[in-house]
Image (spheres, rainbow, N blue to C red):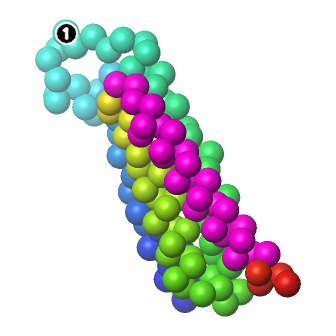
């Protein structure tokens, strides 16, 4: 059973639900209206940042998880998969949180993208090692 992939798919899917809920809330969903004052105003920049935070996770996570799954089925060492998974997941959390919940913060944004790439590069390195 591909347990490493399952762990990270579960974490990333849970975070995607949180980011989705944030976008729904900022769009004024009737499901979340009871959480706010009736006259709440959401500025467009906040909404757009939240949409990008969610969209960015949706863009990166599937390919990462597919590659991780294939590597796990191919017998890649679990420690390498966990290293890449932790780096990627922390990077996506940093990036998603800064876009969806905080004011612009270059450390979280750049750090999040750097860790995302470290995670991907770890899987790519593992792929190359298995192919050779």
| Tally of marks | 1
What is the crowding at mark 1: few (fewer than 14 residues within 10 Å), some, or many (at least 20)? few
- Place of residue 79 in the rendered image (x, y in percent of width and height, measured from the top left): 52, 83
- Give the residue at x 48% y 22%: 48
Q: Is residue 109 magenta?
A: yes
**Split into 4 quadrants, where in the image is the N terminus?**
bottom right
Work out whether residue 16 or residue 64 is closer to the camera in this orientation and state it.
Answer: 64
- Place of residue 53 in the rendered image (x, y in percent of width and height, measured from the top left): 48, 36
Q: Is residue 55 magenta?
A: no
Does residue 108 appear to the left or right of 78 in the view shown? left
Residue linked to disc 1 = 39
Residue 61 in view of the camera: no
In the rendered image, the residue lying farthest to the right is 132
Q: Which residues are magenta?
A: 103-128
Work out whether residue 108 or residue 56 is closer to the camera in this orientation and state it.
Answer: 108
- Give the residue at x 67% y 62%: 121
């Amino acid at each position: 059973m591909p347990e490493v992939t399952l762990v990270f798919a579960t974490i990333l899917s849970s975070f995607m639900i949180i980011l989705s809920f944030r976008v729904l809330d900022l769009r004024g969903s009737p499901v979340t209206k009871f959480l706010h004052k009736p006259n709440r105003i959401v500025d467009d920049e906040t909404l757009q940042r939240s949409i990008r935070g969610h969209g960015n996770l949706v863009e990166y996570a599937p390919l990462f998880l597919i590659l991780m799954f294939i590597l796990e089925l191919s017998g890649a060492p679990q420690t390498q998969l966990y290293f890449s998974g932790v780096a990627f997941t922390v990077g996506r959390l940093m990036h998603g949180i800064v876009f969806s919940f905080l004011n612009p913060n270059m450390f979280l944004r750049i750090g999040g993208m750097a860790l995302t790439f470290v995670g991907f590069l770890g899987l790519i390195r593992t792929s190359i090692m298995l192919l050779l």
